[in-house]
Amino acid sequence: MVQSFLEMPSGRGAWFESAGENFAGLRKRTAPPLRPRHSHRTIFISDTHLGTRGCKAEALADFLMHNECSTLFLVGDIVDGWQLKRRWYWNAAQSRVVAEILAKADNGTRVIFVPGNHDEFARHYAGRLFAGVEIADEIVHETADGRRLLVLHGDRFDGVIMCAKWLAYVGDWAYGIALRWNDLLFAVRKQLGLPYWSLSAWLKHKVKNAVEYISRFEEAVAAEAAKRGVDGVVCGHIHHAEIRQIGDVLYLNDGDWVESCSALVEDARGNLEILRWATPSQRNPSQAPAEAAVPALIPA
């Protein structure tokens, strides 16, 4: 299915064969979790960029295995069609992510996929159901305490995407280089006994234009939500996890899984928070074994 979406050459698009698994096999978890699961009413994740080397698929699969929910929102850029068209890349950890998502759908979780610009091929299928996953351009989610949240990826508010798509591709290429430097830097820091640190995230917070862009993006998304008459908005796209009030609108960004490994979660009372998830391999090796064995579940 995805092969035809991406118009991959014959023989290269055997998605799940690259991990030595067939489609049916992906619908089963490879092993039951050894640690307790966390329960949420709703989980929102986006910008996983499956199909790229920068995707923290090991951490994401671990997060999905240990966090259950009634509704799972996939808020765009789940599969990176831009990268897959240029160069095919898929590993076993990314197949495990797909397996976890399908397992949730099979076990009664409502899974809703809101495509982004990197997986825009799926927007043609909005309103349809594939393998238990609903596809929607956007959707309104009602929290347990009755607030209405508009859920969309957010790329439509990005002037670069809307007005100069070629420039967006250049930016995507440069961002990919920064992510590769992240991995190299992490390897060096790990040898020195230092914890994971993201160069690309640091640059986004330090470069004046990037900081201004993030602020303008957040305000534009919030303005659209206010125009729609909803209480808040959930989006992704800019890889910057955030919860803040902008006027009368609650702005929520669930972050990404190439830098921060973050998700937005809602509990049974409607409380919303951002969680960051770190596998033991992303932690400081000097931590005690008992502590390092448990994934981090940290409010951002």
Image (tube, rainbow, N blue to C red):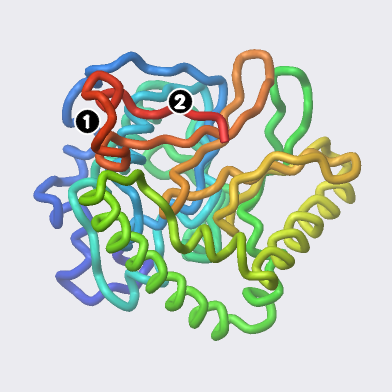
Nearest the viewer among 290 and 28 is 290
User: Residue 64: x percent and y percent?
Assistant: 37, 32
In the image, taking residue 160 as reference, residue 16 lies left or right, namely left
> Does label 1 or label 2 sit earlier along the sequence?
1
Location of residue 7 by image quarter: bottom left
Q: Position of residue 117 (x, y in %)?
A: 54, 65
Instruction: Locate the N terminus by quadrant.
Output: bottom left
- Amino acid type shown at disc 1: Lys
Res. 278 in view: yes
Can residue 2 be seen from the camera position used here?
Answer: no
- Label 1 to label 2, Cα distance in Å? 15 Å
Asked whether 188 or 62 is in front, the reply is 188
Quarter residue 244 falls in = top right
Pointer 1 local density, CA inside 10 Å: few below 14, some 14–19, many at least 20: some
Percent position of residue 176, x then y? 40, 70
Describe the element under mark 1 as helix, strand or loop.
Answer: loop
| Residue in view at x 48 percent, y 65 percent | 118
- The image position of residue 227, as x and y in percent, is 89, 50
Q: How many marks?
A: 2
Amino acid type, callout 2: Thr
Q: Residue at x 80, y 50 (%)?
A: 222
**Would you name the residue on which mark 2 appears?**
109
Give the residue number, with chain letter if any, for mark 1.
28
Please tell me whether residue 151 is drawn above or below residue 275 in the rendered image.
below
Task: Report the side of 80 relative to 210 (left or right).
Answer: left
* Contact check, label 1 and label 2, Cβ < 8 Å: no
Camera-side residue of 131 and 206: 206
- The secondary element bearing badge 2 is classed as loop
